Amino acid sequence: MAGFDDLASERSKAQFDVEEMKVIWAGSRHTLEVSDRISRLVANDPVFRKDTRTMLSRKDLFKNTLRKAAHAWKRIIELRLSEEEAAELRFYVDEPAFMDLHWGMFIPTIKGQGTEEQQQKWLPLAYKMKIIGCYAQTELGHGSNVQGLETTATFDPQTDEFIIHSPTLTSSKWWPGGLGKVSTHAVVYGRLIIDSKDYGVNGFIVQLRSLDDHLPLPGITIGDIGMKFGSGAYNTMDNGVLRFDHVRIPRDQMLMRVSQVTREGKLVQSNVPWQLVYGTMVYVRQKIVSDASCALSRAVCIATRYSAVRRQFGLQSNGIETQVIDYKTQQSRLFPLLASAYAFRFVGEWLKWLYMDVNQRLQASDFSTLPEAHACTAGLKSLTTSATADGIEECRKLCGGHGYLCSSGLPELFAVYIPACTYEGDNIVLLLQVARFLIKTVSQLGSGKEPVGTTVYMGRVEQLMQCHCAVQKGFLELSADLVQAAVAHCQLIVVSKFIEKLQQDIPGKGVKGQLEALCNIYALFILHKHLGDFLSTGCITPKQASLANAQLRSLYSQVRPNAIALVDAFNYTDHYLSSVLGRYDGNVYPKLYEEAWKDPLNDSVVPDGYQEYIQPILKQQLRNARL
Ligand SMILES: CCCCCCCCCC/C=C\CCCCCCCC(=O)SCCNC(=O)CCNC(=O)[C@H](O)C(C)(C)COP(=O)(O)OP(=O)(O)OC[C@H]1O[C@@H](n2cnc3c(N)ncnc32)[C@H](O)[C@@H]1OP(=O)(O)O
Ligand SMILES: Cc1cc2nc3c(=O)[nH]c(=O)nc-3n(C[C@H](O)[C@H](O)[C@H](O)COP(=O)(O)OP(=O)(O)OC[C@H]3O[C@@H](n4cnc5c(N)ncnc54)[C@H](O)[C@@H]3O)c2cc1C
């Protein structure tokens, strides 16, 4: 059978130790063991089936998501899963749901922005899921411009309460995940008003629904904002709309780590920077970078396996056509994506470390690395999500017509992934933040303040001083170019973190060699993509450009025999991939054929509507023909 033989023979060609590469991909032997065990647990549990997801109505889809979330929580309790294991379970269940915002944003916000007392009060309730929370920041009229939010939180000294209010239609909270139908509580971002004075945006814990009957509390209007792009996909999430009509909350429900409001209505600033109000976004952006490598590697795994199974043209002497993976054009589209998946994995690992480091420093009142952490998380979130969204679509095209079928797994993966380019900060808006950070760093070059961390290279580039003078003429005017500079800076981080990874001890036969090839492919591919910039700025000569391209082609040939093993190293189950084209056994055609018959349209041979709509046309044609 074509697919079986092809993938088995590909696996036998691998020139490196796949089991050791699995460890590298997972991060450690321990993480691999956990992820392997939990992925199988999910794959073998019928409640976590997802093969009919794209065919369900929104209501059925959503109810099924609630069922899965409840079942996941039950399993976490029954099996006494650790936090790490629970996060893996969520990952392999592979369905966006209210739990993500509860664990991923509501809890981290209370941890990061709440005082000790507030944490002691709210975290036990949240950890036990006695309350379910979401993150209500974005409004109908403002998402990117957080300082433009309109919701008000006015202090009432008479009652020692804040009055939360939505003064306009555009101040309606709009988009928060988990808000529409599930959350009982939210961290609501609004303008702090004391004695008619506006003190800017702060977070407030607000109860939204009754814990008895789940009805919205008085003064609160909530609903779901409606269907989103694609079938299945992000429609499992209840992104919501929320309005407040003078809702009162106790004073101690303002998150007060950054600034406090006293009983007398005085605002007291802590010694922590006000930007910590944006802290949850730094945390989530860092997580999104790690997730990018998962989504991209998943698409690449599907496209690589299918490219080894699919044959077109070029009859060989044995009468068999050529595997499409052997076409150089296919390799030049696929292998840079394979290399990107590995590159994003390693930069994600580093960013996780950077985030932990900045957090430890914050605990010790050292705020010096916060601007760099903000720039790195914002920039890498932007770069990796844009490349991943484009990469998934490229993988769909690499799979030809069959890639367009839902059973390929790629349409749903694309639909569920693309909002990552927008949520947690629009990708262009985030790059402008990086550009701003770079300009600030450049402006300090002459002042004796040495650049550190990811900007250390700037101290070595003399032309940057002139660059700063040019930018002084107008940040906005040059913003399109500055965004390109921000991307280049982030690419440099990705490449250098890959190189640093290679400097670590990497055991296993041939593993390091494969990673070196992938790292070179990534770097040379980026150079190739921006060749015009490199040539026009005189960074490389035309001769060097052509040598780089020749080297890239040679690297593709080096990776070719290892391609299937390199995607096997992701260790994805067929359940997680949910793709007929990406099946581990390569048994693509019989399963595609089988899958087609499961479509509800094939429940009857003659479709509903035939009698009403088709038959009359046919009869009409018959009459016309007689005329
Ligand atoms: C089953 C049980 C187990 C389950 C486990 C589940 C685990 C799941 C985990 C999943 C994790 C997460 C899932 C999440 C899914 C994502 C859903 C999406 C959620 C959202 O989208 S929330 C809304 C996000 N919104 C945004 O991102 C808005 C974007 N806008 C901004 O960030 C800002 O407004 C701005 C663009 C940065 C502009 O800010 P501002 O107007 O203040 O402008 P300035 O440019 O003047 O900046 C001032 C100053 O502040 C610095 N700065 C800005 N941002 C930050 C920051 N985040 N941190 C630190 N510093 C910041 C900036 O550099 C300036 O500094 P300077 O004055 O130059 O020194
Ligand atoms: C699926 C999904 C889930 C979400 N979940 C949540 C959630 O849980 N909680 C929450 O609070 N929010 C959530 N959001 C909202 C999300 O964070 C915002 O949509 C996002 O921050 C972008 O803001 P915006 O919609 O205002 O875009 P806009 O800022 O209106 O962007 C529109 C266009 O304007 C451009 N633009 C904007 N400002 C500038 C500028 N200064 N310079 C140049 N160009 C600019 C952008 O690049 C973009 O092209 C979610 C959104 C989505 C899609």
Image: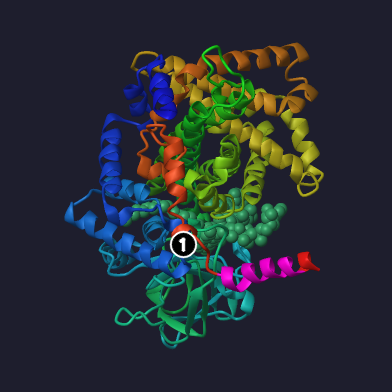
Q: How many marks?
A: 1
Q: Residue at x 46, y 18 (%)?
A: 514
**Residue 156, can we see it?**
no
Q: Residue at x 46, y 42 (%)?
A: 592
Q: With 482 as the anchor, is 423 left or right in this view?
A: left
Magenta span: 609-623
Q: Residue at x 50, y 39 (%)?
A: 299
Q: Residue at x 52, y 85 (%)?
A: 245
Q: Main secondary structure of the magenta part?
A: helix
- Per the image, is 351 magenta? no
- Per the image, is 618 magenta? yes
**Front one among 509 and 499:** 509
Q: From this view, report whether residue 53 is shown above or below residue 63.
A: above
Q: From this view, report whether residue 470 is shown above or below residue 221.
A: above
* Disc 1 Cβ-to-ligand 2 distance below 8 Å: no
Residue 509 position, x and y percent, is 35, 13
Quadrant in which residue 322 is drawn: top right
